[in-house]
Image (cartoon, rainbow, N blue to C red):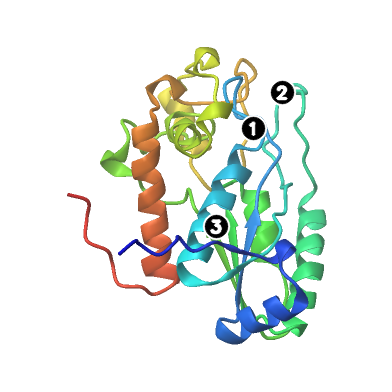
Amino acid sequence: MSAPPPKRPLRLKFLSPGDVRRALDADPRLIVPVGTCEQHGGHLPLGSDTLLVERLADDLSAEFGILVAPTIEYGVNAATPRPLAGNASVRRKTLRRWVNDLLLDWEREGVQEFLLLTAHGHAPHQEALGTVVTEHARVRVIDVLALEFGELVDHGDGPIHGGEVDTSLALYVAPHLVRMEEARDFILPETAVRRYRRGSTLRLPALTDGSVGQPTRASAEKGRRVFEFIKERIRTRVLGVAASAPDA
């Protein structure tokens, strides 16, 4: 007997109002991916954050039957010492107002809980998402890179922006868009490392091409491990599902 076909994500933009009504009656949650259009070094696409949260949203939607909103493609970017081609940011209040307007409409149509998925720990970006207002619905902001990755990569406690973690995830999620021949390590002095911890207000160093850390240590296998770790943490800590057995 053949296995059933894999479930597809419930992407709002492809559904009719009737489809959406039935989905909300079954599960009144909505996943909202929030990406960025931001440099992560010469080896990664500008949409690295976006591609990651979209893939996570699709996987979670397919598994749990939760609706996924169209992606918000822009965020509040880290400051750069010079303009980098393609980089585009919005102000904190712009992002907050944009998300506010969308969530209020969806709430009035029956959404009771919003899961804002983002992969950008820049403090102003997080503040914009963390201060949105709804009438009654619950809002949960999930920074998928705010975890400790420990032994999953060589330097899980180092800067992430365009480094080993970001690059490994991109190699797993969208390998055809990664140019490893362009990857350049940018090792920060120990005195500067704490300024680039996740959740800080970032200002990238003048000599970097838009990334910090060691992207040359990245691999698709590391990316797979990190991705599955992130997804499992969302499943257990956000969606309340019992932990899966570890890989053999």
Identify the residue at image location x=41%, y=26%. 190
Quarter of the rendering containing residue 99: bottom right
Amino acid type for the residue under numbered disc 3: Asp
Quarter of the rendering containing residue 42: top right
Alpha carbons under labels 1 and 2: distance apart: 8 Å
Identify the residue at image location x=75%, y=31%. 87
Q: Position of residue 220 (x, y in %)?
A: 39, 32
- Cβ–Cβ under 8 Å for marks 3 and 2: no
Numbered badge on residue 58: 3
Q: Is residue 245 left or right of residue 91?
A: left
Q: Position of residue 92 (x, y in %)?
A: 76, 52
- Cβ–Cβ under 8 Å for marks 1 and 2: yes
Q: Which residue is mark 1?
A: 203
Q: Position of residue 145 (x, y in %)?
A: 48, 48
Identify the secondary structure beneath mark 3: helix
Q: Earlier in the sequence, mark 1 or mark 2?
A: 2
Q: Position of residue 166 (x, y in %)?
A: 49, 35
Q: Quadrant of the N terminus?
A: bottom left
Q: Is residue 139 above or below residue 165?
A: below
Q: Which residue is mark 2?
A: 81
Identify the residue at image location x=46%, y=26%. 213
Of badges 3 and 2, nearer the viewer stands 3
